[in-house]
Amino acid sequence: MTVSRPPTMPFGWFRIGYSHEFPSEQIRPLHYFGRELVAWRPQGSKPRLADAFCPHMGAHLGYGGTVVGDHIACPFHKWEFGADGFCARVPYNARGYDRARLRMYPVCEQDGMVWAWYHEDETAPPQWEVPVIDGWADRWVVGEVRYLRPTKCLWYDAGENLVDMAHRPVVHGVTDADDVEFTEDGHRLRLRWRLTYDATRIGQGVIEDTVTLEVTGPGMTIMRHNAVVPLIAVCGPTPIDDQSFDLRMTYAMPVKDPDSSQKLFARMFVRYLLQELEHDAAVWDHKAYLDRPCLLPEDGPIMQLRRWATQFRCQAPAAREPALVLP
């Protein structure tokens, strides 16, 4: 069997961090979508995201750059760029250079998380909004768990793992599970199943859980667990490049003031779920993408998920203009 050429990087909204990671008037270098990026937050504004290299002489704005009012300034020659990405000021030339431009990415800040819209074609606007998470405003903040893991595989693998029924008893000790309910609605997808865990290793014996997933594009999944206590997980892969992604998981209870027994179980259950996630990721780090895997009906709706996901493949972008030297 030959290893297939993987699908292209997807377009959509992807989480690039949490609100507290983007303090006011601070700059943060990032690397996602196979690109060097820079994020900054002007005072009183949401974060902004742009390609990191200054179009003047190629300096990386994320290392030594500064926030100047509403602009980001290059550390090399202090050229300033505004919210639209265009050069707004050159300190040693009154005319400036209004054709110099950074590529800007749409950003949404919501529910304490920061999302960026990526498409290979920078002229393509966002095709849907980041949904408000029902129950997130009333979550138990003290029990919020944040998890980040760089993973060496395709973003497809994280999605396919959700509907891969046959790996659950092998990797996770699932003793009983229903088939996946699979409902498509354009860029949205709803999955639901019931399963039973063998959680004796965390002192919980058998746990019955009903899991509902609300998937919005390739980069955002809201996972609702209904075991002993309710839990919400906000998760999704953010492509680092076409061969790896960051997997962020944020767990919380949609309860303002849970009692001590609920808190104790929630902590143990989340710890158990993250341990199980590490078992998956250990396989992902070394697996290959197969365009035509040898599947059986018991494996689950893997190809159905792939067909749904093809709508998020980017088309090749148009070539960018060459550099322009002004007289």
Image (spheres, rainbow, N blue to C red):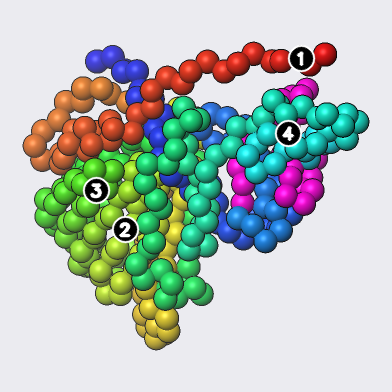
Q: Are marks 1 and 4 in contact (CB under 8 Å)?
A: no
Which contiguous range is marked in magenta?
47-72
Instruction: Pinpoint residue 162: horizontal percent, then vertical percent.
Output: 27, 46
Residue at 67% in and 29% down: 101
**Amino acid type, label 2:** Met
Label 3, residues with CA under 10 Å away: few <14, some 14-19, many ≥20: some
Nearer-N-terminus badge (2/1): 2
Disc 4 versus disc 2: nearer the observer? 4
Left or right of 224: which side holds 208? left
Magenta span: predominant SS is: loop
The amino acid type of the residue labelled 3 equals Leu
Q: Are marks 4 and 2 in contact (CB under 8 Å)?
A: no
Nearest to the observer: residue 178 or residue 73: 73
**Residue position marked by numbered label 1 in the rendering:** 325
Name the amino acid type tagged 1. Val
Residue 223, numbered circle? 2
Residue 23: x %, y % from top left: 68, 58
Q: Which residue is mark 3?
A: 189
The residue lying at 27 percent from left, 39 percent from top is: 160
**Above or below — where is 16 with respect to 61?**
below
Q: Residue furthest left?
A: 297
- Quadrant placement of the N terminus: top left
